[in-house]
Each structure stands twice: as C-alpha cells, then as structure tokens.
Amino acid sequence: MALIEADFTIVGEKELLRTMKSLGVKTTMKLLRPAVAAGAKPIVKAAKRNAPVETGLLKIALGTKVILNKSKQVAFG
C-alpha cells in the first residue's frame, strides 16, 4: 500500500481560532461537526475504493461518525 504525503497551509488560522473562542464551546462544536464530517468524506471514499471485496460488507461498514469527547475535542472515526 502506498503512503500518501500532503503539505498544506492554513490561511487565517489565528483569526479562526480567535473567532471560535469568542463563539463559545457549544456553538463552535455545532460548527465543527459538519466541517469534520465533510473533511472525512474523501478519506472514506478512498478507503471504500481500496477495500478488498469478498462479501462487500467492509465497503458497507466504512463510514464516519463525529463525536465530542469529554475534553471538548472533536474526533471522527
């Protein structure tokens, strides 16, 4: 399996973090959930495309679920 490397730059990171802090945790989490889910879509598509096919259940099972852990951090799996 090939390893994929990527470089990127976030423009406006300081302003974004400042805005998120001013909105409060609850509002920020409401905004982050769909953003994280949208960011995970290409990853899931690639995983489904590269999944081995025996019964097809792996492709069906692959997906995303955005959760908020106790330390108020968004994660996906």
Image (cartoon, rainbow, N blue to C red):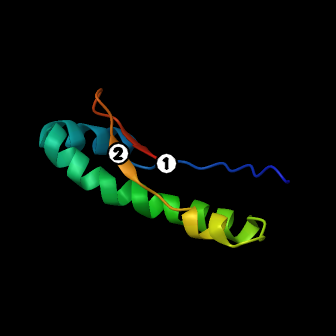
Q: Quick one: which residue is furthest to the front in this view? A: 55
Instruction: Check disc 2 and report the residue beneath it.
Output: 67
Query: What distance separates the C-alpha of mark 2 from that of mark 1?
Result: 8 Å
How many discs mark residues in the rendered view?
2
Relative image position of residue 51 (x, y in whole percent): 73, 64
Q: Tell me if residue 69 comes above or below residue 54 in the rendering.
A: above
- At x 15%, y 48%, the residue is 27
Q: Tell me if residue 55 comes above or below residue 37 in the rendering.
A: below
Relative image position of residue 75 (x, y in whole percent): 42, 42
Kindly state the secondary structure of the residue where label 2 is placed: strand
Instruction: Check disc 1 and report the residue beneath it.
Output: 77
| Front one among 64 and 38 | 64
Taking the image as shown, residue 50 lies to the left or right of residue 36, namely right
Relative image position of residue 63 (x, y in whole percent): 51, 62
Kindly state the secondary structure of the residue where label 1 is placed: loop
- At x 43%, y 63%, the residue is 38
Mark 2 vs 1, N-terminal side: 2
Q: Amino acid at mark 2?
A: Ile
- At x 59%, y 50%, the residue is 8
Taking the image as shown, residue 12 lies to the left or right of residue 5, namely left
Q: Amino acid at mark 1?
A: Gly
Taking the image as shown, residue 56 lies to the left or right of residue 9, namely right
| Front one among 4 and 61 | 61
Q: Tell me if residue 43 comes above or below residue 7 in the rendering.
A: below
**2 and 1 marks in contact (CB < 8 Å):** yes
Taking the image as shown, residue 43 lies to the left or right of residue 23, namely right
Relative image position of residue 60 (x, y in whole percent): 58, 70
